[in-house]
Amino acid sequence: MNAQPSPAQPARAKTHPQRIVDGVTARIRGGELKPGDRVPSEPELMREFGVSRSVVREAVSRLQASGLVETRQGVGTFVLDKPVAEPLLHVDGSGLEVRRKLALLELRISIESDAASLAAQRRTEEHLAAMRQALDAFDAHRRSGESTVEDDFRFHAQIAAATGNEYFEEVLRNLGSATIRRGEARPERASVAPESGPADAAPLRFGDASPSLEHHKETTQREHETIYAAIRRGDAAAARAAMFMHLSNSRERLHATLPQA
């Protein structure tokens, strides 16, 4: 008996942020947007793609992570002079299984512990101010029940920037975007649908609420504050230890979401 061919899997629809990323990237690669040109503003992109402001901001964050654009506070987003064709370490977090995220998080433990140590020695007042802003936003969004994923990412990214080493920034940007999945801000959910759930169910994301992680956001805030305090006072050894403890704890919290054998 001849085996019946399996039905083709339906193509997964692009997310709204990815539609914007692809559209702007095509304009940059095609020369419609040249180095130094201003990318259409948030309201313009919202009208063109029919999306919310948070979706546009997520798309711009992805474009920044790809090395295509930079955002100047209060001015706008501009095409970089030399767009990076491919990141130093390209990791796509959108399809990573939780177990692979655990492995990447394990790598981050080693890298970011050193980054925190260097940040304590090299940080400027501007770096400290940016870290403080990310911490305050995390706490405010946590208290109001909103997503804290972007704030978490920003805090770790600012520590990488404070090292003064572009390779730390590049590696951590890619590892962070895979393990701290950045997405459209939205109210926290009471639970996370299993991977075998319906096609439109949101996948598990590091930083998302779940029955086993919901009460850990306050703990994460305290761990962040400990890292920040060590960096602020210039204590390299304490900053390294605090970051090691934070990411080790984060890994255990994520590991707890896995089905028990």
Image (spheres, rainbow, N blue to C red):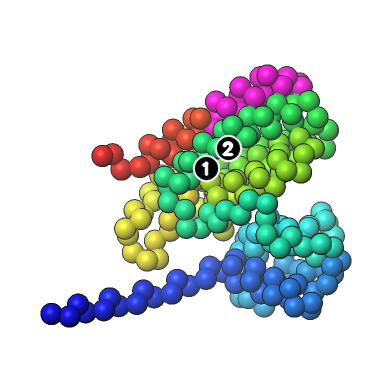
Image: 245 above or below 57: above
Q: Position of residue 183 (x, y in %)?
A: 56, 56
- In the visual, does 96 lie left or right of 193? right
Asked if the stretch drawn in magenta spans residue 244, the answer is yes
Amino acid type, residue under disc 1 in the picture: Leu
Please report the residue visible at 50 percent of the width from the left and 53 percent of the height from the top: 187
Magenta span covers which residues?
A: 229-247
Tell me the quarter of the picture where residue 231 sits.
top right
The image quadrant where one finds the C terminus is top left
Q: Which residue is mark 2?
A: 108
Q: Position of residue 91 (x, y in %)?
A: 57, 53
Q: Farthest front residue?
A: 1
* Callout 2 secondary element: helix
Q: Position of residue 136 (x, y in %)?
A: 67, 38
* Callout 1 secondary element: helix
**One can see residue 19 in this view:** yes
Q: Are marks 2 and 1 in contact (CB under 8 Å)?
A: yes
Tell me the quarter of the picture where residue 7 sits.
bottom left
Asked if the stretch drawn in magenta spans residue 201, the answer is no
Please report the residue visible at 73 percent of the width from the left and 19 percent of the height from the top: 235
Image: 215 above or below 37: above
